[in-house]
Amino acid sequence: MTDQSNTKTILKRMYAAEAEYLLAGGPGNADFEPLAEHFSSEVVLHQAEALPYGGIWRGHADLERFFAAMSGTWAVFEFVEQELVATDEDTGTAVVLTQVRARSRATGRELEFPILQTITIRDDRIAEVRPFYWDTAAIAAACTPEQATPHR
């Protein structure tokens, strides 16, 4: 069980560590450990399969690979606005609404979109994250270079 003020503190610290990690250059350039310490060693991150970094990511090593995949996909991925929408003290679950501004590395296309995440906290660490994207097809399309049409 996690109380709401503790949940807010845990999330605030994790998002600050994530921003610091990315500002320091992210995967391959920054130390992942200060970010990893906010997550359970058995963390599970569920990403929609339609995304370039889709799938289930388990544990710290997978989480670090996830950040590498995100960095490979996005040249810019910033949280414009973020709101802790709800918490459930009994389950340790928080709901976070984030407005994102992003630019694809592959295409240079820019998008703005919301992500709603459910985040489960156990023993003061993030144990599970489930992001829900408004339009995964639009995100995937923005990250996919258009195929040249052969001339006949």
Image (cartoon, helix red, strand yellow):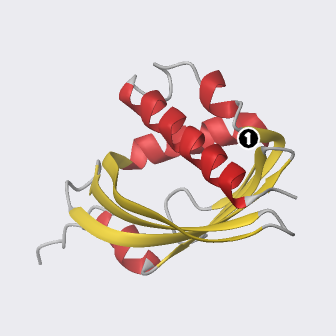
Name which quarter of the figure residue 88 lies in: bottom right
Q: Position of residue 41 (x, y in %)?
A: 83, 37
Task: Tell me which amino acid carries mark 1.
Answer: Phe
Q: Quadrant of the N terminus?
A: bottom right
User: Foreground residue, 135 or 142?
Assistant: 135
Q: Which residue is mark 1?
A: 39
State the residue at coordinates (61%, 31%). Answer: 35
State the residue at coordinates (62%, 38%). Answer: 65
Q: In this rendering, would 18 be left or right of 118? A: left
Q: Position of residue 135 (x, y in %)?
A: 42, 81
User: Foreground residue, 147 or 98?
Assistant: 98
Q: Position of residue 89 (x, y in %)?
A: 80, 67
Q: Quadrant of the C terminus?
A: bottom left
Within-10-Å neighbours for mark 1: few <14, some 14–19, many 20+: many
State the residue at coordinates (20%, 61%). Answer: 109
Q: Position of residue 23 (x, y in %)?
A: 37, 29
User: Relative to 18, does residue 50 appear above or below in the rendering?
Assistant: below
Name which quarter of the figure residue 53 lies in: bottom right
